[in-house]
Image (spheres, coloured by chain):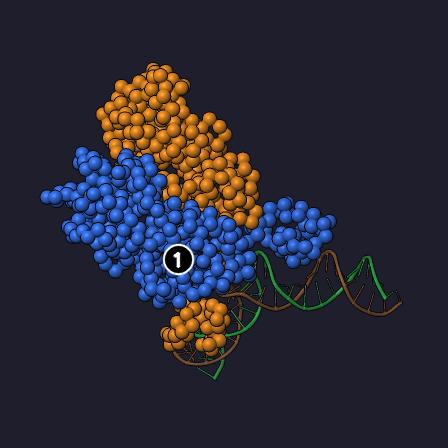
Chain colours: A orange, B blue, C brown, D green
DNA sequence: CATGATGTCTGCATCGTTGCAGAGCATTCA
DNA sequence: TGAATGCTCTGCAACGATGCAGACATCATG
């Protein structure tokens, strides 16, 4: 038989639909006796409310969507966990979707009849889509952007200070006396804004110590994956004067670079020191363990969810640019 | 202004609601001229269909839910990617939820008024909840179980042959002449069915070669995380006669164990060989790289989604027990 | 010219639920 | 006694969309 509805239960219990609804929702004006009688029928037929109908009536779903490029990138996986925790505190459920860093899929999400309308709000970690496109869509669903892009003040945005983070990482290496510090992960094109900010930080760290940057030591990578880090490191090792340290724009790149170094028989950190960004758990267990700049993921999640829910409730002020703290975690790969 | 509805557009364009709906959905019986006129209004007001309403009317959402214990466990993250890909082929969207391996949250998902009713079907990778509980719920939503549990034929179930996989892994070590092969990850209690199957395989591999198992070499762990693998390995190293090889019940345990070995100055694989299960990408980049048993994740996803969608369409046969192939991938940690 | 077929377009009912206004009844108070 | 109050309970309308049956106009056919 089809799933029982309120009507079915009402008929069976000889009461009005409305009363059954009241019992289901525990509303006050139902006598204990009748409540019990209805409850029996509810259990008998195994009634379960149709959330779609309830949502339609109430105009909200209690769900927020979290859209990330890739779930199998540990940073995002760890962030998701924090977001789910943060949202639960507000009684919201989080549904995660993955775009594969495909601009088409990101666009799809914001398009006319997208599933996104199923959510009361959207946390978006855009990779490929640009600010213009995002603004173009007349999307009524509140959106908060996470991390990876800086937009010009059209949306709420939560991220670490990428320039400072990169400066810290690079500075740590320079202060050790390393003088040929490479950088892996630049993305000198439209959608690589985060990477570009990190490159700025890398340059600033050099400038502050009055050092020049050897442009050949800056290796761009289209994405932030282990394999690309490995390949970039191999290219650096092939230079006539290879680096004595590497700042990688995220931990995955760093882990790939370390793999290349280990395989090439270079000692870490003696021959080459390595620093990453993200503080993913994997870096605690690698050999050597990975020095990294840790964004406060829990704080990112809390603030992002907070602002989003304010937006949903209509109490959100003008778009805010929220900066979350980060800190350097020194482990073996760049120990003193 | 509130979000425009079909009614708003209809009024503005001086046509019936029904006609606007036809234009939106591209249905046939609308003249080109009228279609164009309505389209203009649609664009003007920025109409976007309310999916909740559409779903209610149609009785389906086009969404399937994927529930995993932990998204930041790489195996699950990688599986999620495959599931999303597989589901897209059927025109379904996947929403991911995470239970934290908390029985309470798993139960919540199947409970009376759970969000689960928002999905046309559910892929569930249960960790804490038992078969009995699952069956108890009169859940009308089709469910397919993934991997981690063997239930007695009440549900569709997709997994590798855990006994065979463990036998393969252990056998690989024994065939190398290793004679003190430890096992990390047993879970000798109710919800540890997968672990218990792997222990069976471990024992079978020994039995087939006429070897006895040293029970002290079987180290249980409540979960499959890096830290627990590390701690288990440390305990094994403290034995008077430590192992010369370890079979870990998943790759994370193995990576933790390798970290302990590296830290203790043991050479891998010379002093101690290591094998895991799952084939997560991290194992390709660890030092040394990790030998592992690789389940065919893409196939798991394809089959699971396939059966689920058959169930949704009502064409699913009796609950099926689907076994997916696996293969040994030999890398440095247990090379010959 | 009557008939039927075709092509457009409309209105009503409906999906399953909740908001709202009010009915019916008993109790209380002046 | 009559009105006022409070407690239960009910029925109608509505959320925003689509299925269905049918209205109307147009056209071709015998």
Observer able to see residue B259:
no
Q: Residue, x 39% and y 72% (percent of image)?
A: A43
A15 shown above or below B8 = below
Q: Position of residue B270 (x, y in %)?
A: 21, 36
Q: Position of residue B299 (x, y in %)?
A: 42, 50
Q: Position of residue A154 (x, y in %)?
A: 50, 37
Q: Residue, x 46% and y 55% (percent of image)?
A: B306
Mark 1 lies on residue:
B322
Q: Residue, x 18% and y 42% (percent of image)?
A: B244
Numbered-mark total: 1
| Extreme residue toward the left, this view | B240
User: How packed is label 1: few (under 14 Cα within 10 Å), some, or many (20 or more)?
Assistant: some
Q: Residue, x 45% and y 34% (percent of image)?
A: A149
Instruction: Describe residue B240's horizontal placement relative to residue A292 as left or right.
Output: left
Instruction: Describe residue B83's horizontal placement relative to residue B207 as left or right.
Output: right
Name the quadrant containing residue A181. Answer: top left
Q: Quadrant of the C terminus of chain B?
A: top left
């Amino acid at each position: 038989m089809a799933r029982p509805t309120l009507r079915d239960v009402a008929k069976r219990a000889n009461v009005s639909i409305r009363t059954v609804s009241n019992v289901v929702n525990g509303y006050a004006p139902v006598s204990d006796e009748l409540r019990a009688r209805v409850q029996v029928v509810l259990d008998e037929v195994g009634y379960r409310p149709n959330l779609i109908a309830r949502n339609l009536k109430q105009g909200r779903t209690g769900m927020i969507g979290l859209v990330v490029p890739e779930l199998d990138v540990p940073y995002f996986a760890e962030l998701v966990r924090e977001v789910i925790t943060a949202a639960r505190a507000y009684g919201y459920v989080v549904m995660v979707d993955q775009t594969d860093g495909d601009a088409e899929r990101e666009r799809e999400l914001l398009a006319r009849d997208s599933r996104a309308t199923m959510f009361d709000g959207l946390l978006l970690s855009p990779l490929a889509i640009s600010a213009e496109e995002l603004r173009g869509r007349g999307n009524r669903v509140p959106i908060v952007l996470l991390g990876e892009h800086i937009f010009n003040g059209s949306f709420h945005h939560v991220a670490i200070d990428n320039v400072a983070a990169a400066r810290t990482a690079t500075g740590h290496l320079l202060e050790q006396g390393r003088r040929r510090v490479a950088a892996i992960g630049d993305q000198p094109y439209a959608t690589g804004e985060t990477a570009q900010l990190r490159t700025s930080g890398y340059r600033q760290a050099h400038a502050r110590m009055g050092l020049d940057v050897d442009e050949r030591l800056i290796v761009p990578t289209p994405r932030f994956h282990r394999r690309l880090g490995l390949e970039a490191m191999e290219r650096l090792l092939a230079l006539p004067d290879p680096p004595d340290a590497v700042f990688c724009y995220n931990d995955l790149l760093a882990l790939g670079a370390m793999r290349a170094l280990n395989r090439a028989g270079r000692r870490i950190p003696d021959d080459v020191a390595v620093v990453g960004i993200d503080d993913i758990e994997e870096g605690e267990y690698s050999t050597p363990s990975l020095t990294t700049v840790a964004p406060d993921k829990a704080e990112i999640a809390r603030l992002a969810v907070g602002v989003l829910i304010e937006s949903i409730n209509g109490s959100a002020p003008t778009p805010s640019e929220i900066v979350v703290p980060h800190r350097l975690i020194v482990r073996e790969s760049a120990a003193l």
